[in-house]
Amino acid sequence: MKTKTAKRDVRAILLALLVFALAGLLAVSAFAQDVAVPPADRNATQAVIGDQLEAFRSGDHARAYSHAAPGIKSYFDTVDKFIAMVAKGYGPVYAPQDYTFGRNTVIDGEVYQEVIITDHQGKQWQAVYTLQRQEDGSWKITGVKINPHRGASV
């Protein structure tokens, strides 16, 4: 039984990584559109991302999970599964030394927000978050694409 559960968990992680990668491909091309995010939405989405990063940093996994969109939660139906995926596939996001917000844009109501993350070894990463406004008006994270940072903020 444990083997089937482990295989199912691995499949869920791989599927989520694929979803995040596809979201990232869209995110990279999104900045070419360069449509300004309204200031109130920019502040709200940056607050969500910042709070999730701070929650990861402080070990408050339930709080970090609370910022995930329903689609992400459908793949990772527990905090532990979500945290395992983030820790394994998104180390700099899970344990940032420092971060700074870069450019952002909005396409079809979805916000793309660049975050430059510095890990504990001093290496910089470009993370592009996607967020969607929920029916209750809150913003939730729908995906993250992370790559080594190559110079100035894009």
Image (tube, rainbow, N blue to C red):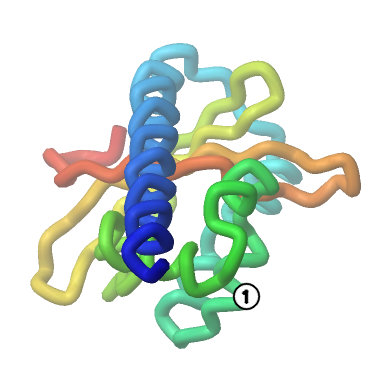
User: Which residue is pictured at 86% across the width and 46% down the height?
Assistant: 137
User: Which residue is pictured at 51% across the width and 34% down the height?
Assistant: 112
From the viewer's perspective, is residue 109 above or below residue 68?
above
Residue 153 coordinates in the image, percent (x, y):
28, 40
Residue 27 coordinates in the image, percent (x, y):
42, 27
Residue 140 coordinates in the image, percent (x, y):
67, 49
> The C terminus is located in which quarter?
top left
User: Which residue is pictured at 68% across the width and 37% down the height?
Assistant: 132
Residue projecting furthest to the right: 136
Residue projecting furthest to the top: 33
Camera sees residue 15: yes
Relative horizontal placement of residue 111, taking residue 151 as reference (left or right): right
Relative horizontal placement of residue 2, taking residue 135 as reference (left or right): left
Question: Relative to the observer, which residue lies in front, 134 or 85?
Answer: 85
Relative horizontal placement of residue 109, taking residue 55 as reference (left or right): right
From the viewer's perspective, is residue 80 above or below residue 145?
below
Q: Secondary structure at mark 1?
A: helix
Residue 76 coordinates in the image, percent (x, y):
54, 56
Residue projecting furthest to the front: 1
* Amino acid type for the residue under numbered disc 1: Arg
User: Which residue is pictured at 34% across the width and 33% down the height?
Assistant: 21
> The N terminus is located in which quarter?
bottom left
Camera sees residue 102: no
Tell me the residue that label 1 is attached to. Answer: 63
Number of marks drawn: 1
From the viewer's perspective, is residue 77 above or below residue 57?
above
Res 120 → quadrant: bottom left
Question: Relative to the observer, which residue lies in front, 84 or 154?
Answer: 84
Res 38 → quadrant: top right
Would you call the spot at circle 1 few (<14 residues within 10 Å), some (14-19), or many (20 or more)? some
Question: Relative to the observer, which residue lies in front, 8 or 78?
Answer: 8
